[in-house]
Amino acid sequence: MLEFINLIKELTAMTINFTGIKNPQILISRHGSLLDVGSINSDESINRIRMKCYLDNTLETKELSEFKRVITQDSNLSEKFSNFTDKDCLQIDISPSRSPRNFGYSINLNGAEVNQWDKSIFGICTFLCAITKSLLNKNDLTPKLQKYIKVMNIVSDRIGKESLKYVK
């Protein structure tokens, strides 16, 4: 995963210091299956993991600017997020997908599906990996929340790696 993140950082020149991710909240949907994540009962399965957070842009943080820069690389998403500010909630949904357009999972940002066959997927996956990895390094999250965030990190990394094989 570290190799993937380093490669994509070179491609997208990302400058994130991870302190501008505010109020992360994890919500799950238990109808279907995503990945087995620890304390879920064996008869329960998760069909979607949703992370809500706010991105900040101050002298110390550049997450909002980096998110907007990455999003402008995707013509479908750039219009949706053109007026996105630090007061707007970023909602990231990860769910399983059987669509041949996706690499096993679907990524939605505020309800808009991310095109996994567009070059913009590299920056978006890198950004998602960076956000989730930074949250995993914080000590104030419960172990259960860390498990769900780790799943989001693994899925973002997996999609990015698969995209590198096929998207030109």
Image (cartoon, rainbow, N blue to C red):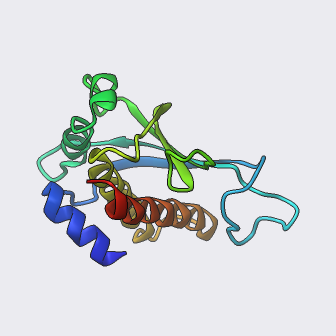
Image quadrant occupied by the C terminus: bottom left
Question: To which quarter of the image does residue 16 belong?
Answer: bottom left
* Residue 113 seen by the camera: yes
Name the one closer to the observer, 159 or 30: 159
Q: Position of residue 26 (x, y in %)?
A: 57, 50
Q: Is residue 14 visible?
A: no
Total residue callouts: 0
Residue 68 in the image, given as x and y percentages of width and height: 23, 37
Q: Nearer the viewer, residue 127 or 58?
A: 127
Instruction: Kindly identify the residue that appears in the image at 27 percent across and 45 percent down.
Output: 120
- Please state if 106 lies on the left or on the right of 131 as rendered: right
Q: Residue at x 40, y 47 (%)?
A: 116
Residue at 31% x, 76% y is 2
Which residue occupies 29% across, 34% down?
86
Q: Nearer the viewer, residue 140 or 120?
A: 120
Give left or right: position of 44 versus 112: right
Q: In front: 157, or 27?
A: 157
Whether residue 144 sits left or right of residue 13 in the image: it is right
Expressed as whole percent of the image width and height from the top left, the position of residue 38 reads: 70, 72
Provide residue 106's location: percent of width, then percent of height. 53, 46
